Amino acid sequence: MMCIPALLIKVSLIMMLVLSGAMMVLMFMSGGVLGGIFGAIFFLIFVCYAKAVWSRIPFASVNLLVATTAIKKNAGVIFVSYIFVAVAFGWTLLWSISLMGVWDQVVSTETKTTDVGGGGNSATYTVSSASYGYLFLLFLSYFFTHQVIQNTTHVAVAGTVGAWWFAPEDATACCSSGMMGSVFRALTTSFGSICFGSLLVAIIQSLRALAESARNNDNGILICIADCILGCLESILEYFNKWAFVYVGLYGYGYIEAGKNVFSLFRNRGWEAIIADDLVGNVFFFLSLCVGGICAAIGFAFDEDSPPGWFDDSPSPGNIGAVCAGLGFVAGLVLSSIMMSTIASAVNTVIVCFAEGPAEFEANHPELSRKMRETWLEFYPECGA
């Protein structure tokens, strides 16, 4: 990734274009004319997008190079991310067990009988009702905890990259003092800001989950509209939080103060920040898919090379190859996505740091600073970094 960042971004962008075109063709071939028309519209939009952002690839590739360099110097932050993911997995298991324990008290089912067409004919149907207050609190506890874990990791990564940017002598080892200090601040002084921002998203996610659980009711259209609106609000707030927590990790700001700085960032360099973030995100998505595919092939090969009789007692011994491939794909996708999300947080931090402290970057990392300045001035020759 550090050797060919520009090539990876270009390949991922082309692959997204190819996939959208393939989906359009498949829709037309399957007879779905309306779906094919929508597919063609999205394909043309993506073509225009690819043409518009192609010139920004050098700047995005240097952002990716700087981010991976910072993470490589502080590789311990990746292990911290995996620890937080393990905590999130444990919380999911605990929450699922708790939900099963109170399900009968939260959701009640009643069987009713009604006459059909007279003549003594009757039909039996089941009506489910839920205590939405309790459901909301259950969903809120689940989503809030996951948001806190996710954002704590993001803040820790941002603080680590910030230490490498402004004080590299404290952040040039696997478990450097800069990295450990960032994790400590994320779990102590910045934890209130993390919880506040996480709560806002968790409330919207809980309302969406309630809307999904009530989708079978008579007012399905209104619920669908509400779900769509909540989904848009959730996406906007999550994207805002992603940048706000960079400022929390870098400077220890409160959530409100960090939000004000996000607006200043987008006012000054908004589109460049969004485009660089989006282009690099495509790379992480396709790299995760590639790792998942490699692990799927390894899983399938494991079945082929396994000693006779290993899987004779399995529920479906004839499909063991597909099962091993599927498990390998999921495992590879999840594990690689965790690492990619760590680097994605670093990319966001690099974009903010380049806007906030270019002089410190020039003093501490002159070679990388020169590359970033050159690519920035190539697209904006009338202004400096």
Image (tube, helix red, strand yellow):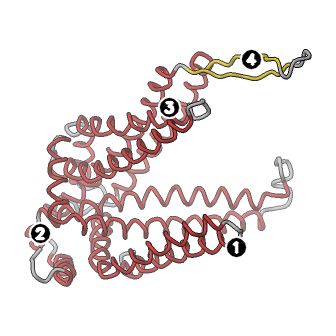
Residue 63 image offset from top left, x and y in percent: 27, 71
Q: Earlier in the sequence, mark 1 or mark 4?
A: 1
Residue under label 1: 29
Q: Is residue 210 above or below residue 109?
A: below
Contact, CB < 8 Å: mark 4 with mark 3? no
Q: Residue at x 62, y 60 (%)?
A: 329
Q: Earlier in the sequence, mark 4 or mark 2?
A: 4
Image quarter hosting the C terminus: bottom left
* Amino acid identity at mark 2: Pro
Image quarter hosting the N terminus: bottom left
Q: Residue at x 33, y 77 (%)?
A: 53
Nearer to us of marks 2 and 1 is 1
Cα distance between the residues tagged 1 and 4: 45 Å
Q: Earlier in the sequence, mark 4 or mark 3?
A: 4
Residue 358 badge? 2
Compare residues 281 and 251 and report the one nearer the observer: 281
Residue 111 badge? 4
Please tell me in which quadrant of the rendered image residue 350 appears. bottom left
Nearer to us of marks 2 and 3 is 3
Tally of numbered discs: 4
* Amino acid identity at mark 3: Leu
Cα distance between the residues tagged 4 and 3: 23 Å
| Callout 4: SS | strand
Residue 226 image offset from top left, x and y in percent: 45, 38
Q: Is residue 117 above or below residue 266?
A: above
Please tell me in which quadrant of the rendered image residue 215 appears. top right
Q: Earlier in the sequence, mark 2 or mark 3?
A: 3
Contact, CB < 8 Å: mark 1 with mark 3? no
* Amino acid identity at mark 4: Thr
